Amino acid sequence: MIEMKNVSKTYKKGRNVVDNLNLKINDGEIFGFLGPNGAGKTTTIKMITGILDITKGDILIDNKSIIKEPVEAKKMLGLVPDNPDCFLRLKGIEYLNFIADVYDISKEDRIKKIDELSKLFEIQNVLGNKIKGYSHGMRQKLIVIGSLLHDPKNWILDEPMTGLDPKASFELKNLMKKQTEKNKTVFFSTHILDVAEKLCDRIGIINEGKLVFVGTYDELKKELKGNKSLEELFMEIIKND
């Protein structure tokens, strides 16, 4: 469970990038976080995960405050950031073992998990290579695998489909569904609205830092009085806002 209470992020000149955000993502649901470029999606995700300080308000991860109990809160998170270009001098297997060390995963458990996920995403043969030699898609797969090694209660993904081939995207979506089958939380941002339409239990739409809609796809259709695609409804609500 992820709960945001009156969350704001203010940068220089007093501009609110995220403005008084109140949102609860329940256990066992896939929640899609949608919005145009610059709406505040990545800033929100960075506050949830403790990468950015919160100007006002608080965020609870399974009732642990990311401000007051950051280490305990972060233990319950798995993050796929919007940019996979990190630790490029390491080999793939060195990166995964580093993540496993951070979360104190046993040797037996990490070997099993790395073997399972690297085969699923078909990168088992390049784990001995340095990450700087990976394509963007391969780096994305590696980051996804690392984020799941400790079997997080809350899985947070920022534009996770970027750079993935169709098979990897399919496997990622299946993993997201499997997480919720175990009563875990999946929170992800995306610009691929047909994916959100088919995959999400609920969606939230943010525009200029403000949350302008939260609910199901059917509830959005009812609110805007139209049997349209999520893409069409999204454009309508952003235009009207």
Image (tube, grey):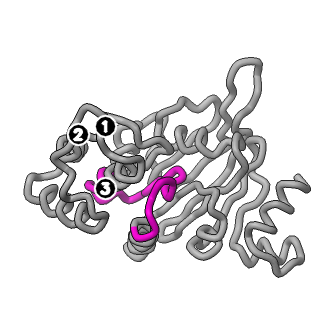
Q: Nearer the viewer, residue 128 or 29?
A: 128
Task: Tell me whether the residue at label 1 lies in contact with that at label 2, contact meaning CB atoms closer than 8 angstroms.
Answer: yes
Rendering coords of residue 81 (x, y %): 46, 45
Tag 3, which secondary structure?
helix
**Amino acid beneath label 3:** Ile
Query: What secondary structure is marked by label 2?
Result: loop
Disc 1, SS: helix
- Answer whether residue 148 is magenta in the image: yes
First along the sequence among labels 3 and 1? 1
C-alpha distance separating marks 3 and 1: 17 Å
Q: Which residues are magenta?
A: 145-167
Relative side of 203 to 95, left or right: right
Residue at the disc numbered 3: 145
On whether residue 149 falls in the magenta region, the answer is yes
Image point 39% across, 70% down: which residue?
171
Q: Mark 2 — residue?
A: 130
Please report whichever mark, 2 or 3, sits nearer to the chain's N-terminal start.
2
Residue at the far bottom: name it. 227
Q: Are marks 3 and 1 in contact (CB under 8 Å)?
A: no
Which amino acid, mark 2? Lys
The answer to whether residue 60 is visible is yes
Instruction: Report the residue marked by disc 1.
Output: 132
95 vs 44, left or right, is left
How many discs appear? 3
Q: Residue at x 17, y 51 (%)?
A: 105
Disc 3 vs disc 1: which is toward the camera? Answer: 1
As drawn, 35 above or below 194: above
Indicate the position of residue 232 as horizontal and vertical percent values: 80, 68
Residue 101 placement: quadrant: top left
Mark 1 to mark 2 CA distance (whole Å): 5 Å
Where residue 228 sits in the image (x, y, percent)?
81, 77
Query: Marks 3 and 2: in contact by CB < 8 Å?
Result: no
